[in-house]
């Protein structure tokens, strides 16, 4: 490939330099040979060149860069005019040297220290968000916030009536599952009738609100994150800020309040359907609807209902906060919006389960 | 006379029942830098979308190298599209990918280059648009002008025969815009590609265009066709002369 007469090496380009032509030399070989020679000039001779495409250009460009770095003069002979021109365009701007991070193997990338730093940063940003939220809420209560009622109403519609269908389906099915689970066990003691107590108490205190919350986390929490994330991408949030409006007051507060208002209502609806679902299964086991209702009534108490409703308000807050925080902190690319939505759902569900456990422990201690 | 690369015959464009443009008849020759111009809302971008096959024409035909694109089946259309490179108004780069990944995509899909060859070609294409060394940057990390050039690099990744541009200099400062124009001319001269661009930037039109068509919003058809420098001085249409000479005094009304 190279012929050498001390000062000048000639790089002879022969044959076809197109895709699939085969037999193309590797640039690394040329680089190796060239370094061994210590010459002052490299001449690319294209007198025997056949067809060519971008592959030739890529090769020549690398040769040119190598010569530039090694202070070797680069010249050409019998080069097609188009190649000359393209090479001229391609070498007009010297390559940018990015501040390259050293590539480390995958196992070296995650370290305990980095994880702790990450955790600290996340905790701080969470605290910051909660702080902003508290300030916004205070401004709202004192009537100084830029929160529009119409936004709140739209968010309520989105988080409430729009969710009826999916909530209906999940609640009926969960009620049925509870009834099945109880019936099989209670039958061993001949106490099938207590299925009604189990379903009513289980739904009111736990399953109704938890299932609603999980569905809303996947539905509305993710929607909040995606909405706010794409607003971040479109510089809409920047626009809100430069209008002198706090995005937390304008965008986050209506969403959080809407979910906190709608969650208890959806929970009541879910409770009702869950109990009906349980009744369907109980009917299949020989418990008449009247018996089911009568037995259920003895278990039904305002305390159980209130436990569920108290949880639902807190769950609504947690879901909305997780969703909005993920959206507001989203990066500015389509992939980042996807990550924000994922983060919103995952965080919301973790929050939900921790909060539910805490609630149950507290209620146990207090004796409710 | 050189062979027509793209031919538009009796094209009629509508959105539903709303007529945008009718009776469009013109040819774009191989190696032309062809400009589609006109005031706001005249249907320039709509015409480009018709040429790209993103919108179906209400009537008429579009031919590439003598072959009808409108009547081609989807597989044939994709094959014809293979020889096009398109730069969208806001770049159209995939924001979740680095520049290298953006360029690698068409190469992976339509060529059999090995991954090291691909890397070499990506380095070369980025160097052509003056972005050598920016392989690992995301589109959000570079400036608007650089994004336009990166989009151009992706458009020329497969060595296209036709390059389409939608408002290449929109949102660029005059200097970046001129550099981009120069780059387009240089690429055109060295690859011999046909360039079709939608623009209303007069410096671009006079600087690089070799042929043009003017779409009029009021009469809903083309009212001028030819070298824009000729049109500025000798067009029989007052509107066209005013547009190109940038006069606003005369009785031309802005069309919404």
Image (tube, helix red, strand yellow):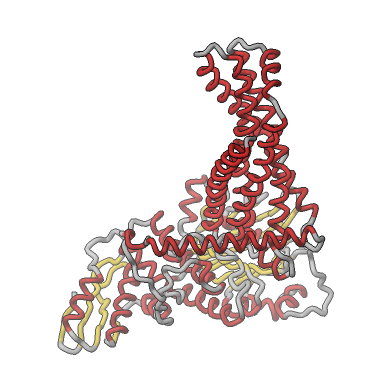
Among all residues in the image, which is located at the extreme front? Answer: A366
Q: Is residue B155 visible?
A: yes
Quadrant assignment for the C terminus of chain B:
bottom right
Tell which of A77 and B180 is nearer to you: B180
Among all residues in the image, which is located at the extreme right? Answer: B251
Q: Is residue B30 visible?
A: no
A354 horizontally vs A166: left or right: left
Check the image and report above or below for B76 versus A43: above
Residue B33's quadrant in the figure?
bottom right
Tell which of A363 and A156 is nearer to you: A363
Residue B21 percent across, percent down from the top left: 71, 58
Residue at x 51% of width, y 72% of height: B142
Residue A230's quadrant in the figure?
bottom right
Check the image and report above or below for A278 versus A123: above
Residue B253 percent across, percent down from the top left: 82, 70
Residue A69 percent across, percent down from the top left: 30, 83
Residue A36 percent across, percent down from the top left: 16, 81
Check the image and report above or below for B220 versus A281: below
Q: How many marks?
A: 0
B103 horizontally vs A105: left or right: right
Check the image and report above or below for B33 versus A278: below
Residue at x 49% of width, y 59% of height: B96
Residue at x 63% of width, y 12% of height: A287
């Amino acid at each position: 490939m190279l012929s050498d007469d001390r000062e000048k090496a000639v790089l002879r380009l022969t044959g076809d330099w197109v895709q699939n032509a085969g037999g193309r030399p590797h640039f690394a070989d040329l680089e190796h040979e060239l370094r061994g020679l210590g010459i002052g000039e490299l001449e690319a001779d294209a007198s025997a060149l056949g067809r060519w495409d971008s592959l030739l250009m890529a090769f020549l460009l690398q040769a040119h860069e190598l010569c530039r770095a090694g202070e070797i003069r680069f010249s050409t002979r019998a080069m097609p005019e188009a190649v000359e021109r393209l090479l001229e365009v391609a070498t007009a701007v010297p390559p940018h040297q990015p501040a390259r991070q050293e590539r480390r193997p995958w196992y070296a990338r995650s370290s305990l220290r980095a994880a702790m730093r990450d955790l600290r940063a996340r905790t701080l940003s969470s605290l910051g968000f909660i702080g902003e939220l508290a300030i916004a809420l205070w401004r709202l209560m004192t009537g100084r916030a830029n929160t529009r009622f119409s936004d709140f109403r739209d968010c309520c519609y989105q988080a409430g009536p729009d969710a009826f269908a999916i909530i209906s389906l999940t609640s009926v099915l969960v009620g049925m599952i509870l009834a099945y689970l109880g019936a099989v066990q209670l039958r061993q003691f001949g106490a099938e009738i207590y299925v009604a107590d189990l379903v009513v108490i289980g739904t009111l205190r736990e399953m109704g609100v938890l299932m609603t919350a999980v569905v809303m986390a996947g539905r509305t929490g993710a929607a909040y994150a995606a909405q706010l994330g794409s607003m971040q991408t479109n510089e809409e949030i920047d626009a809100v800020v430069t209008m002198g409006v706090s995005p937390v007051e304008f965008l986050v507060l209506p969403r959080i309040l809407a979910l906190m208002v709608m969650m208890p209502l959806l929970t009541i609806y879910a409770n009702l359907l869950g109990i009906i679902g349980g009744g369907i299964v109980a009917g299949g086991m020989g418990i008449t609807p009247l018996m089911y209702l009568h037995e259920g009534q003895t278990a039904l108490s305002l305390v159980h209902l209130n436990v569920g409703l108290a949880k639902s308000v807190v769950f609504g807050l947690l879901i909305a906060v997780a969703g909005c925080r993920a959206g507001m902190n989203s990066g500015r690319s389509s992939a980042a919006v996807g990550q924000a939505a994922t983060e919103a759902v995952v965080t919301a569900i973790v929050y939900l389960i921790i909060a539910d456990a805490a609630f149950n422990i507290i209620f146990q201690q207090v004796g409710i | 006379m050189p062979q027509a690369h793209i031919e538009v015959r009796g094209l009629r464009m509508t959105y539903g029942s709303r007529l945008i443009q009718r009776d469009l008849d013109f040819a774009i020759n191989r190696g032309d830098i062809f400009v589609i111009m006109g005031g706001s809302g005249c249907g320039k971008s709509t015409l480009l979308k018709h040429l790209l096959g993103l919108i179906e024409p209400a009537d008429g035909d579009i031919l590439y190298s003598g072959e009808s694109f409108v009547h081609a089946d989807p597989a044939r259309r994709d094959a014809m599209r293979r020889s096009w490179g398109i730069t969208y108004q806001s770049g159209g780069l995939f924001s979740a990918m680095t520049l290298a990944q953006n360029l690698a995509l068409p190469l992976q899909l339509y060529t059999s280059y090995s991954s090291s060859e691909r890397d070499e070609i990506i380095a070369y294409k980025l160097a052509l648009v003056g972005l050598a060394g920016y392989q690992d940057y995301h589109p959000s990390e570079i400036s608007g002008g650089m994004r336009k050039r990166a989009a151009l690099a992706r458009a020329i990744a497969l060595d296209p025969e036709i390059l389409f541009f939608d408002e290449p200099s929109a949102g660029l400062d005059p200097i970046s815009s001129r550099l981009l124009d120069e780059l387009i001319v240089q690429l055109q001269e060295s690859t011999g590609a046909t360039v079709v661009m939608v623009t209303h930037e007069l410096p671009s039109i006079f600087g690089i265009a070799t042929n043009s068509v003017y779409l009029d919003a009021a009469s809903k058809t083309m009212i001028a066709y030819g070298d824009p420098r000729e049109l500025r001085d000798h067009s029989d249409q007052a509107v066209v002369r005013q547009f190109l000479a940038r006069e606003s005094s005369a009785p031309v009304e802005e069309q919404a």
